[in-house]
Image (cartoon, helix red, strand yellow):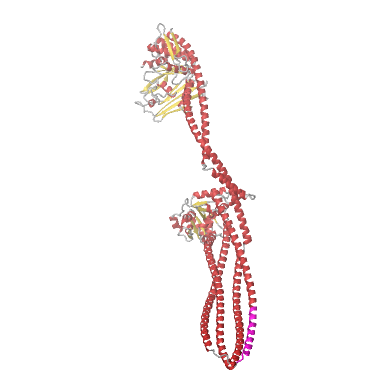
Amino acid sequence: MKLIEVQAHGFKSFADKVTLKFDGGVVAIVGPNGSGKSNINDAIKWVLGESSYKALRGDNMEDVIFAGSETEKAMDTAEVTLTFDNSDRSVNIPHDIFTISRVLTRGKGSSYFINGKEALMKDIKEIAMQSGISKSSLAIISQGTISDVAEATPERRREFFEEAAGTSMYKTRKADAQRKLVKTEEALVHINSIANEMETQLKPLQRQAEKATVYLDKASQLKEVEIALLVHEMTEAKNTLKDIFETHGNSDEIIKDLDQRKQQKQAKVEAVSLHRVQLDTQINEYEKEIKRITDEMSDLKVRNEAANQRRELIKQGKLNVTSEEKIAENKAELNELNQTIGQLKSNKVAIEKHNDELGEKYTEIRLKLSEAKSKLDHHNDQKMRLSYNLQNLIETRDKRTNLTKGTKSIVENKHLFKGYRGTVSELLNVPEQYVKAVETVLTAALQNIVVDTPEVAVHAVEFLKKNHAGRATFIPLSSIKPRFMREDHLIVAQTQEGFLGILSDLIKVGREFDTLKKFLLGNILLAQNIDEANKLSKLLEKRYMVVTLDGDLIRVGGIISGGQVQEATNTFALDEKIKAIESSLPAIEQKINELTSIYEEYSLKSENISQTRIELSVQSAKLGQQIQDETRKFDSLRDEIESITNEKITLEENIDFTETITSISAKREQVEQLLTIKIKERQDVQADLNTHIKEKEEIEFEFKRVYAAREQYMKTQYNAENTIANAKERLSKEYELMFETAKELYYNPDIDYAGAKLVVDELRAEIKSLGHINIESIEQLKDVQSRYDDIIANQSELKNAKDTIEQAIAEMDKIIIERIRTTVNLVNTEFKYVFNKMFGGGMAEIRYTNPDDLLETGLDIIAQPPGKAIKNLKLFSGGEKALIAISLLFSIIKAKPLPLCILDEVEAALDEANVIRFAEFLHKLKVDTQFIVITHRQGTMERVDHLYGATMQNRGVTTFFSVELSKAKELVEQQ
């Protein structure tokens, strides 16, 4: 490798750009003191990485930048570039020619470049070490430092040999390796500590994660079985409901019919029962009349016999006629009986009056019962019609809006989403005349689902994904802002006859949805027709969407769409009707419940009054019987008084009772015939009553049976509906599944329900026995295990790295030892020869300070010029020190040729004879080494291949030029 060119600008005294070219051999740079010739040496050292400003003869690094002169301004940048011939590939750069540069800018520091590309300082130093011309080698010897080579410490002197041996590069690499080794060992200690700590974390985490894994497995099994059970229960419940609807769908009509028949039969039984009571009363009266007549006949016979006997006794003079006292007693008793009969008749009249009043009340209640039944039937019919209409309206709306699968899924499961508000079409109240316009503008947005927050929307989207239930669009109220029309634009629009208003102002919503309304329609204008819309759009520079009452549309920018459209679906009107029906149904339900209570109350009152009237009729009949009995007694006493009186008359007048008895007997026969007729009629009425009672009991039995069956199936229906609702709620809340999805994934028609329930109980017990579960431990274990594995991998890498570094250091130690030994031996041989030549005799030798440690040993110089004793190098004269140092330098170059050597006035202290020897040696060594010599000695100038002169034509600014020897002498003499 050879130096081809040096370019410098702004470095020290090089205010003007300086270029020095070198063709090889020995080049000398001459000039008077202070001309800046040594700055070339500093420039080369600086480019090669010199970082000591003292070594560059400055107080700080920025001192190398041109500071200005009397004629030149100070510069802000110093730049030096070296160009090398690398055709022998001394340096590991794939170019025959390469450059290295260094640029220093005030306040910004240095930058390095290789072939014009920015590089690091270590890259530059690597090149210097590869070539053997680093700043620590003997390749660059500055002014006044040659004697330092001789006086250097053994350790410093070793560095010269290391540069020559090419081990400095290895030592640098070794130092780097040792630093890496220290860092690696520190990292290894640290990572071992972390690994130990993580091992203590892993064991409990592994136990927790193992338990959590078991739990998740059990929970997963439980989930599958529970969902399968829920699906089974829902399926069975749905089948049960289907069977109920098919089997008992007309039970209400049957119960209604049976109830009517029961009421009719009850009325018939009551009527026949009343007739029977009347017949019983008549029969009772006839029987009493017959008994009275019979008693009267017997009494007449007895009286007739007694009269005959009395007459006979009277005739015989054995009996007196004394009946006045008896008549008086009977009249007193007759008076008491008359009072009793009066009281009984009064009681009977009161009972009959009360019965008549109850009859009127019964009629009134039966009228109210009929009225309540009519109203109840009316409201039930109304409820049925409304429910039917509601279902039809919902089906019509769904068909018209054609809800997407996703929207329909969310609407059907809205109970799962706390912030669900409804679809846009449900929330907007649009008057009939604006329906076409709103539907044209919003189109698919009518199906958008309004929710409170974005979080609700995210939850709903996750639900749709999980259940493969389609897609839906959501409008979070908390995220939207109202849209407005500019005030000045609105004023302009209001001047147009065809402008009907801003669409958002023409529809109604709840106060909480005002922002939604303005977000959707706040900047959309409504026009009378397409012509007016077009004028309005142009007037407003096509900045707003304009829609007409017929649904024609002009978009922002002027795009027009319109024509004949299908009749507007008016989902808004449908929604309003649906809402109206849904809001009215609870009131109707409540009215039905009230009427049912009233109907049941009147039914109970009717039955109670009917029963009371029967009881009162019985009481009245009993009172009638008592009245008859007392009347009979009254009549008997009266007859007895009459009989006594008659007897007295008879006795006195001798009356015969035979005709009277015959007449009364005939009357009795007549009454007996009437009694026979009434008994027969009563038997017929009783048979009829028994038939009606039996039929009523049969109807009641059937009513109770059907009603009980209805109660049972309603209970079954209620249980089935509850089962469906509870299962649906559990599927939604616990598993976030729709029934259809759950059925598709988990339905098993052959499931052993009882066995599955046992499995659920067992799994629950097993899960409970696990105790506290840390679910996060699984992920924590993965995280810790991953980090632990990484740590172990890093630990292994560090161990391998440590082994590799130690092996590399050992290999470098071998190379360093071998190269130092070889170089010292070669240089020692050459040193003896060169020393002898330079001093004209004498002895010199290089010795190890520690032969047992060639890695660290220093190097001593033993020198004995001719005729002198061996002594410490410091005791030699300056010229002798310089000559010894030059001898060592030449010995090293002979043993290990350097590509370049820069010598700055190293021969200044030599006498003329030794200068000549010095110059001649340069010529011998120039075959393998390129020399740049900065000198003012004639002996040197006379023997170089090329001369450069340095001068300061302008004070403070160095200029170089090629010179002949004579001119060079003149330059030197100028000092």
- Where does the image place residue 317, in percent across and percent down from the top left? 58, 92
Specify the farthest residue to the top: 867
Q: Residue at x 56, y 46 (%)?
A: 764
Secondary structure predominantly adopted by residues drawn in magenta: helix
Residue 597 shows up from this direction: yes
Residue 245 figure quarter = bottom right
Residue 398 figure quarter = bottom right
Residue 942 shows up from this direction: no
Give the extent of the magenta segment: 655-680
Counting every numbered tag in the picture gives 0
Q: Nearer the viewer, residue 145 or 288?
A: 288
- Where does the image place residue 634, in percent across and percent down from the top left? 55, 84
Q: Is residue 950 left or right of residue 813?
A: left
- Where does the image place residue 391, in percent across and percent down from the top left? 58, 60
Q: Nearer the viewer, residue 684 or 968?
A: 684
Say whether residue 678 is magenta: yes
Specify the farthest residue to the left: 70
Figure quadrant of the C terminus: top left
- Where does the image place residue 12, in percent across and percent down from the top left? 39, 24
Say whether residue 621 is magenta: no
In the displayed structure, 499 sits above or below 99; it is below
In the displayed structure, 834 sits above or below 452; it is above
